[in-house]
Image (cartoon, rainbow, N blue to C red):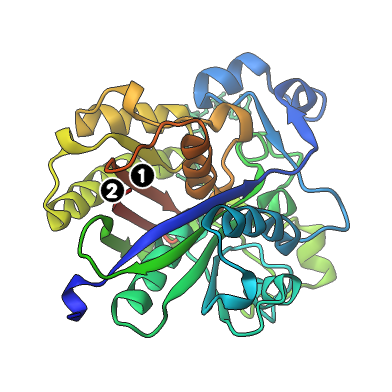
Amino acid sequence: MSGAQRRSVILGTGSELPAKVVTNGDLEKMVDTSDEWITVRTGIKERRVLEEGKGNADMAYHAAKRALDDAGIKAKDLDAIIMATCTADYLMPSSACVLEDMLEARKAFSFDVNAACSGFLNALSVADSFIRTGQIGNALVVGSDALSRLLNWQDRTTCILFGDGAGAVVLGASENGHGGILSTKLRTDGSYAKTLYVPAGGSLKPARLETVRNNEHTITMNGKEVFKVAVRSMEEISRQALEEAGVKIEQVSLVIPHQANRRIIVALADRLGISMDKVVVNVEKYGNTSAASVPVALDEARRQGRIHKGDIVLLNAFGAGFAWGAAVVQF
Ligand code: ACO
């Protein structure tokens, strides 16, 4: 078969959300906020928080197991594990390596991709390229983040937005040229690096007593700027991904956008000219789970029977970097 006909197909999906629920009411007791303010501005009602003593890979493991079961593939047969995260268990090695060991996926090579909230699209695109070029036959692609670990729980402008979770897909190769991942598009604009970032803990400003005292290990954000650029960029890249796939917006059965804020999602749907009944929204339950948000929403949509054979689904995301991306997938 020629390389042009080889495509990646989604064989299975899975997700995992930590058991601990933090409601807007709980946050009212911690910061000067209200359920009404959070609901109106973001659509979020509650979020999940990973219990102390657990790391990112613990969530990723359960999501991965479910995706592997769904795909009917054994971990030992995986060729690659690509994990999108900006909250790895350790600064090194990668969480993908931790996950590989937990799954006993001894044959796989594994690495992390960090594109913050957009990371799953990047990981999907990388895995898709490996598969299309014939270097591998399958891959586990995970989006998993525990942003609760990067929150200043005294900062009402950020702590209300985020939650923890993990989502995974198993990709395989199809030689028949029908369906699968039809296109992926990625973009970044590093001039916005400090519009949404964690100032300390990296090589520029390593952890010191002073950085901890100054709360520099937590998310700092200009929310208004993020909002504006997110809507515009996700619309643009979605249109580019659709064009590359040769798909018209009317042919899209479902849009699965990054779950950051209901208002961003509604504005995006409006600009794309797609009705909200074709858009997956679960932000009210989980908040913004960063790299996990798209694969969690995809898994839920599949399990709710919202995706049928032949359906074309548009995925898109936006986050710190700024980094953003979109993918068009036919099931
Ligand atoms: N509770 C009550 N009041 C609050 C809260 C809160 N949690 N947070 C801020 N306020 C106050 C502000 O202090 C301000 O008060 P002031 O008028 O007295 O100064 C007022 O509410 C309005 O604040 P704004 O920042 O103007 O509110 P805005 O309508 O922009 O909503 C929000 C803020 C929700 C953060 C919005 O800008 C947003 O969602 N931005 C996108 C951010 C995002 O999603 N980041 C995630 C990462 S990137 C991504 O995933 C897309």
Whether residue 29 is visible here, answered yes or no, is yes
Q: Residue at x 80, y 67 (%)?
A: 210
Q: Residue at x 37, y 78 (%)?
A: 130
Ligand 1 within 8 Å of disc 1? The answer is yes
Seen from this angle, which residue lies furthest right?
Answer: 53
Whether residue 322 is visible here, answered yes or no, is no
Judged from the image, the secondary structure of the residue bearing numbered disc 2 is helix
Q: Residue at x 79, y 25 (%)?
A: 26
Q: Which residue is mark 1?
A: 230
Q: Which residue is mark 2?
A: 233
55 on left or right of 114: right
331 on left or right of 212: left
Q: How many marks?
A: 2
Residue 13 in the image: x percent, y percent?
52, 51
Instruction: Say what amino acid the circle numbered 1 marks.
Output: Ala
Q: Which mark is residue 177?
A: none
311 on left or right of 51: left
Asked if disc 1 and disc 2 are in contact, CB closer than 8 Å, the reply is yes
Q: Nearer the viewer, residue 69 or 255?
A: 69
Instruction: Say what amino acid the circle numbered 2 marks.
Output: Ser
Q: Nearer the viewer, residue 88 or 297?
A: 297
Decide: few, some or many residues near mark 1? Use Cα within 10 Å; few <14, some 14-19, many ≥20: many
Judged from the image, the secondary structure of the residue bearing numbered disc 1 is helix
Residue 52 in the image: x percent, y percent?
87, 52
Residue 97 in the image: x percent, y percent?
67, 78
